[in-house]
Structures are given as structure tokens and as C-alpha cells.
Image (cartoon, helix red, strand yellow):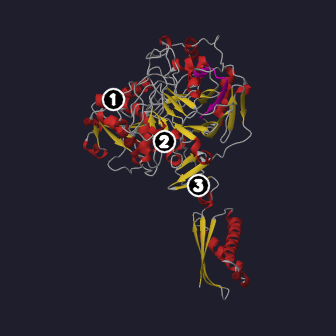
Amino acid sequence: MNENKDKFAGYPAFNGVVEEKKPAQILNGTLDSTTEKQETSPAKKHMVEYVQKPRFDKSINQKSTNVRPQGVKSNDIAQKLINSNTTKPVQQKTNLDTVASQDSSVVNNENPNMKKRIFNNNNGNREKNNKNLQIMFFGGVDGIGKNMTALKYGDDILVVDCGVGFPGNDMPGVDLVIPDMTYLKQHANQVKGIVITHAHEDHIGSLPYFLDTVKAPVYASRLTIALVENKLREHPRVKMKSVAVNPHAVVRIGCFTVEFINVNHSVAGSYALAITTPVGVVFHSGDFKIDFTPLVGETTDLARMGEIGQKGVLLMLCESTNVERPGSSMSERIVGETLDKLFEANPKKRIIITAFASNVHRVQQMMDLAKHYGRKVAFAGRSMISNLEVAMKIGEIRYDKDLIIDIDRVKNYADNEVLILATGSQGQASTALSRMANDEFPGITIGANDTVIFSSSPVPGNEKPVNEMINDLMKKGAEVIYDELADVHASGHACQDEIATIHKLLKPKYFMPIHGEYKHLKAHRALAIRMGMKEQNIIIPEIGMVVETNSNLFRRAPFDVPAGNRLIDGESIGDMESVVLKDRLQLAEDGVCIVVLTVNTANAKIIKGPELIPRGFAYNNEVNYLMEEGKKAVIDALSNPAIFKEDSSIIKANIRKTLSNVFYKKTKRRPVIVPVILEN
């Protein structure tokens, strides 16, 4: 345990009891540094003073460990938590509103002796005026991934999430897609903090490319901070100020006050956010589900959401991933029961499981089952090993050292003595399971005595590579089990009943659906209208859109911010309009033809060539004919001596045009033409 504490000795973080003189405490409530004089934390200079964590009414703050009774719907639960007939979404100031507008003052006067404090990233008193709150969308509303939203009031900007997307078929060679952060980088001095809801790549992946310019502190759960730090090892020049927060923590960031609310998701340390602004409360759901039987920790904090809803929510931003699915999502505990049955049903086989590397609680289930059935555990894949090392160091995973073996030692054990946990749940070509399926993984050969379990579901757009991998594994004789055959995966996203529960609890005045494709956002809008929201109080956001709001205003601003996609290609960053990307697409579509010739410009003659070298363009039965036609066309195009008096770029353009016309006339294809002119 001491080792784990040392791991986070540099974080200004949160934990139940404040021990004065000891920096970087983990508080459940709030933090300041008014009594600490040492400069031990990178974000220490931002610390000021107090606030008490939100009060919980004992009558509705009971931990829920029971499964929802059969026949009881989500809305029934919401109805019991709050009295919807008497509560209206009034925009009066709450305790947290007071925090946002009054620096270093006790908020909850019901217990004046309580000495909790707040981490404050606000430099002195700020002028509060009647400016509108602006919400800016840089990602997360044009598909699954690349989540990034900013709230701006006056000169203060709060960023929520900073994720990546993954390249489609129209982006050959591209590694990652990140949001266009031009506006935020141009206003870097106004960015007071970055709040991360959870540790999935579509919420943290762009941080290395954002923190190189924006030096604001990052606030997130302990696991999220640890995984981000691990990611930044690949970017040694990028430095991060970080603040690890526990559920119920209340943090002041500029003119904003953020409360972190526990939610269930497919990665530990996931939060929803109640952001108190000078104009009202903005609730950001993050990614969530309502799991009444979670593997570890508490269920989604519906009680606190009910309290916030009673006080009044100006605007809600809520995820929409599974809004088209009726009912509720499956509990993670059911996955464990299914895996247990599969272990029991395969006593003589080798078991290989692939899952999201960040789902550490799912991995914990698998390790516990391996120990129970007398199997050693081997990890295959860099991200699996890296993420689990981090989780183990901070105590998120409990394990017996004797249980784990190196992947190279698998061959020394009988098949029924081994469990392999591998990356590759999304069919990625370079991952461990993909290499096993293609006989490219050293020491592992897939065969009839293997049971391969996909404890995951394909991310939208990845269905084809996942199905291809399943087919390849089956062709080698392996038994393959996936979510359509058994309950081996539980989505981390809320379905219709769970989303309706959040709406019922919070009763926002205004609403914007986020985190999904347009069809998901549209379906979420329809759900909100069915629940009684006025159509004019709902806006479906777009990339680059700015929405302005206050207690009496909700509209699209008359201006947008620069937004779109930026492409990570190795060490380079480009944009969708890049000539590089256009050339790659043309190369992939029509191939290339290189033209080499030597000329004597003084005599206006071709000395050697032209030689045509086609790649990915001409088929064997046509290549000789096409190259001969091309040579004749180039010689004819350069037959006029006057052309040699022109600049070489004009000569090359002439060759490109000539060959492009010839090849299109003969083949209906336009390869990339690359002239190479050597002067003698």
C-alpha cells in the first residue's frame, strides 16, 4: 500500500481526512493549501481555500447493492427518488451556485464546524456580470469518439474531455484523428482547467496534443490520471499538472465549480459532472449506465442526481450511444456468471479472452476465475500489459504474483492450465489476437483445443475486421464465443430506460444530446420530447457550434469556432484537406506511374527514355500495351523544341496532363503521374 501512495505522491488529490503538512492527499470532499507552505505539488500555486462537499440526505443516500426487482422500471425508481409533481426546474441559486460566485466562503451553513475545503483554481475575485454561458463543441457530436466540449463564461474556459477518434477507410496510413483545437490553443491563457470524465481513449487520447500548448491542470479520477501519465511517457516533452479526485469531490476552476458524481461504466473511475456556472447548473453525464450490481464500488449515484434535479438544472448534456436500445443495459455481474460457466464447460481446453484493456474490473473477474480453476494467466499485447501494470500499481486490481506468467512460458504448460488475456477485441491488424489468428505470434498456434472468447462488442465501424478475425480463428478449428452467442459482454452505455431515468431525476430546463452519430442524437431528442421537454428547449449540437444560454436564453450563437478533424500520422499532424491524404486516396484507388527521362535542354532533345514504371495501376495483360502508348504520347508532347525553354515544372505538368488523358481514355483510371526529369 505504501508503494501505491508513493506512486501518487506528486498529485494534489482527494481523501477523507485532511492531514495538514502532507501534500497530495486523496480527498472525498475538497482541498486547499492554506496551511501547507511546501511547494510539493505542480498545481500547488492554484490552491486557495475551502468548500464543503455536498450534503447527502440520509433518507436517499443508501448504497444500492440489490438487483432491480422484476417488473420495476427505471422511471418507477426515479419517481420514488423525487417528487416530480411538485418539483419544477427553477433556476434559483443552489449551494453550489454560491460557491461559484463567492470565493473562499462556507457554503453549507447547516454544519459550520465542518472543516472541509476546496481546491481552487481561481486567481482572486472575478467580476460577475450578465454575460451568457457559451458551450462549444469540438468533438463527440459527429460520431462515436473524439469527445471534447468547452464551457466559456467571460474570460474563463473549462474543457470537458479531450479524446481521439479512429481513422476510417478514407484515411489510409493515418494513426489517429483528434479534434481541431485551434480556438482553445489561441485562448490557452483562458483555459482554467481540463476535466476528464473517464479513461477511455475517446476521452483522453488527445491530451498529449493539447497539453503541449495548454498548461491548465487536469482533473480526473485516480485511475484516469495514472493512465494519462502512462500515455504521456510516449511524449516526454509534454508536462501535465494533475489533480486526482474521488466521487463527491467539489472543485472550483475559475468561475466554475465542478462536482464529480460516481457513475457506472466499462472503466473504473468514471464520473458525471455537475458544473455550477454563474448562470446556472450544467449537468454533463459522461459515459454511464445504471448497474445495480456493479462488480466493484457503488452504483450510479442516482440519489445525488435527484438532489441536484430538485435544486434546478439549467442545461443537461447527456450521452446517446445506446438510446436506440429499449430497456436497460445488462449488469457486469452477469458477464462474470457467464464466464464462470464457460470456464467450467471447457476443462481441457486452452482459453483465450480478448476484452478492452481499460476494463480492469472485467479483467479482475477473469483473473479470479483463472485462480479458481487452477489456470495461470498470461497477458498478450502492449496496451493490455501497460494498462494492467498501472491498475496493479494503484491497487485497482488485486492479484497473486504466482498467478501471472510471461507469455513466452505458455508453451511450458498444458492447455487446460492457461488463460491468455489478449488485445485485439476490435480486429486491429497489429494486435496480439490478430497475430495469433494469422500464425504470426511467437509460441502461440491456434487450434481445435482453443476456446476464444470476445468479451467485447465491435465499436461502430469495426464490425467487418472483427468478423474477419472470428472467421479466421474458426477456420483454424478454434471455438469462438462472442456477444451474440452468450452474455460475455455488457455495454457500458445506458439504454432507453436508464437515459429516461436521468431525465426524470434532473428535469433540465434545456437539453443537448451528445456522444453519438446524428441518428443517435435525433433519437435522444425524440425521447426527451416524449418525456415532456419543449422542442424549442432542445438543440442538437454540431461540430464547431457555439450555444449561448442563461436562465432566459437558449440559442445557437451567430458565430462558430474553428473545428473539425486533425490527423495524426506518425510524428506529423495534418488536416482532412491535406494533399498527402488526397494523394494516398488516389494511390489506393488508381495507383501510380513514374516517368523517368533524361533531356538536353541546350539541344532540346530527349537523350534517354522516357521509361514508365507503373505500380498498382496496370494489370499484366495490359501493362506492355499501356506503357508503349504512354511513351509515344510523352515523346509527341515534347516534340516541340520550344517547350525545353520553359521551366521544368511546366514540362512536368505537360507530361502529367498528357499521360493522364491517355491512361483515362484507355482504362478509365487516373493514376498519380510522377515525372522525373534528369538534365544532361
Q: Quadrant of the C terminus?
A: bottom right
Q: In the drawing, does residue 357 fall left or right of residue 562?
A: left
Residue 141, magenta (yes or no): no
Could you give the CA–CA distance between mark 3 and mark 1, rounded to whole angstroms?
46 Å
The picture quadrant where one finds residue 280 is top right
Q: Which mark is residue 369?
A: 1
Dot 1: element: helix
Q: Amino acid at mark 1?
A: Leu
Q: Are marks 2 and 3 in contact (CB under 8 Å)?
A: no
Q: Secondary structure at mark 2?
A: loop
Q: Which residue is mark 2?
A: 426
Left or right, residue 524 beside residue 409: right
Residue range in magenta is 500-515
Which mark, by number, is residue 447?
none
Left or right: 533 as drawn, with respect to 73: right
Q: Which mark is residue 574?
A: 3
Where 452 sits versus 85, above or below? Answer: below
Measure the C-alpha gap from mark 2 to mark 3.
Answer: 25 Å
Q: Quadrant of the N terminus?
A: top left
Any part of residue 238 in sight: yes
Which tag is nearer the camera, tag 3 or tag 1? 3
Which mark sits nearer the N-terminus, 2 or 3?
2
